[in-house]
């Protein structure tokens, strides 16, 4: 509701960037409190109290600052997400296309953390350097990647699905690179470069995941149901992929061997996810183009 359909990429990109900044600040403050506490349990309790106060302050800020766009809401009969809205979301083709494409890219996001043991065990990266790489991967890419992805969508591809398709191509190239790269300390520079490429694809796309909802003009009354159901599809990898990734990579330092093909299986799954992502985003673009062609010539597109 903060912008037109062609501004969604930038808006969601900045949303992801600001989210990265706030989560970084709050995360470091929380870690500092726990570290400074006499006992870890005391520190954790204080972090919980601070989070609770932040939630209450945020609620007050929303109440005071956020204003409802009455003209937009006047176009909609109801706002509650009921069974009727969920049923409409099930019937909406974009629910499955958007949820599926996000789920496939989210597989990359979920498994990014397992690149750390790969760099340590396969390429002999020192622990200190691993810590620095982890901070850059987790915080810097999230803060910078979201806004960059949003700008690229609005100024380059002019389409979120089109940008996501390119992101899947880049992610596939990096996954194939890891798949064929020998685990040799002499190739550590190549491994780090491949990780950077994968992070760029993942974090720039995270900023524009949900821009697709506004871009394809899902009716405002259905957006709650569509986003809710699509989220259930999109974040499904969280239910099983971390455990599967841990099973694949094992823990050689503690005598836990790799299972089920190890890193080879993990990157092979990511390659398949990227290929499916390219197909799904292509379908989304074609369905959108077909919808636009079927509109009456005098139909005026009014953004929500």
Image: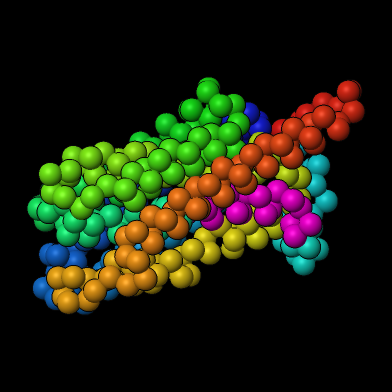
- Which quadrant of the rendered structure holds the N terminus? top right
- Give the magenta range: 89-106
Quarter of the image holding residue 265?
A: bottom left
Image position, residue 73 (x, y; %): 75, 44
Q: Residue at x 86, y 33 (%)?
A: 294
Q: Is residue 171 left or right of residue 250?
A: right
Give the residue drawn at x 66%, y 50%.
97
Q: Nearer the viewer, residue 49 or 9?
A: 9
Q: Residue at x 64, y 39 (%)?
A: 282
Q: Residue 227, image x and y in percent? A: 64, 54
Magenta span: chief secondary structure: helix
Does residue 125 appear left or right of residue 9 in this picture? left
Q: Position of residue 274 (x, y in %)?
A: 49, 48
Task: Locate the C terminus and report the quarter of the image it occupies.
Answer: top right
Query: Where residue 237 sits in the image (x, y, percent)?
Result: 49, 63
Q: Is residue 93 magenta?
A: yes
Residue 15 falls within the magenta-colored stretch: no
Q: Is residue 141 above or below residue 59?
A: above
Q: Is residue 288 above or below residue 118?
A: above
Examine the image and state in which quarter residue 232 appears.
Answer: bottom right
Relative height, residue 243 to residue 217 (above, below): below
Using the image as rendered, state which of residue 230 and residue 249 is in the foreground: 249
Residue 214 seen in render: no
- Please give the name of the residue rendered at 23% of the width and 40% of the height, measured from the top-left corner: 190
Q: Would you identify the image quadrant in which residue 112 lies?
A: bottom left
């Amino acid at each position: 509701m903060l912008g037109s359909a062609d501004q969604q990429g930038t808006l969601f990109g900045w949303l992801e960037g600001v989210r990265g900044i706030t989560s970084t600040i709050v995360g470091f403050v929380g870690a500092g409190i726990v570290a400074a506490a006499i006992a870890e349990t005391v520190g954790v309790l204080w972090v919980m109290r601070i989070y609770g106060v932040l939630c209450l302050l945020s609620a007050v800020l929303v109440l005071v600052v956020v204003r409802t766009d009455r003209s937009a809401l006047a176009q909609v009969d109801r706002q509650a997400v009921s069974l009727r809205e969920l049923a409409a979301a099930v019937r909406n083709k974009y629910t499955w296309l958007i949820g599926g494409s996000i789920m496939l890219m989210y597989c990359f996001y979920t498994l990014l953390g397992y690149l750390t043991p790969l760099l340590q065990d396969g390429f002999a990266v020192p622990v200190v350097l691993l810590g620095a790489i982890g901070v850059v991967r987790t915080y810097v890419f999230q803060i910078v990647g979201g806004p960059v992805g949003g700008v690229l969508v609005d100024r380059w591809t002019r389409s979120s699905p089109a940008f996501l398709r390119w992101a899947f191509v880049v992610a596939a190239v990096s996954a194939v690179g890891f798949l064929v790269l020998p685990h040799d300390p002499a190739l550590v520079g190549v491994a780090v470069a491949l990780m950077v490429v994968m992070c760029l694809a993942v974090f720039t796309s995270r900023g524009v995941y949900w821009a697709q909802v506004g871009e394809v003009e899902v009716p405002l009354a259905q957006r709650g149901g569509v986003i809710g159901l699509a989220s259930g599809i999109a974040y499904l990898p969280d239910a099983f992929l971390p455990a599967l990734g841990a099973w694949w990579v094992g823990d050689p330092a503690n005598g836990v061997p790799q299972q089920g093909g190890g890193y080879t299986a993990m990157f092979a799954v990511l390659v398949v996810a990227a290929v499916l992502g390219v197909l799904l985003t292509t379908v989304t673009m074609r369905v959108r183009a077909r919808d636009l062609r079927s509109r009456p010539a005098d139909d005026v597109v009014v953004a929500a």
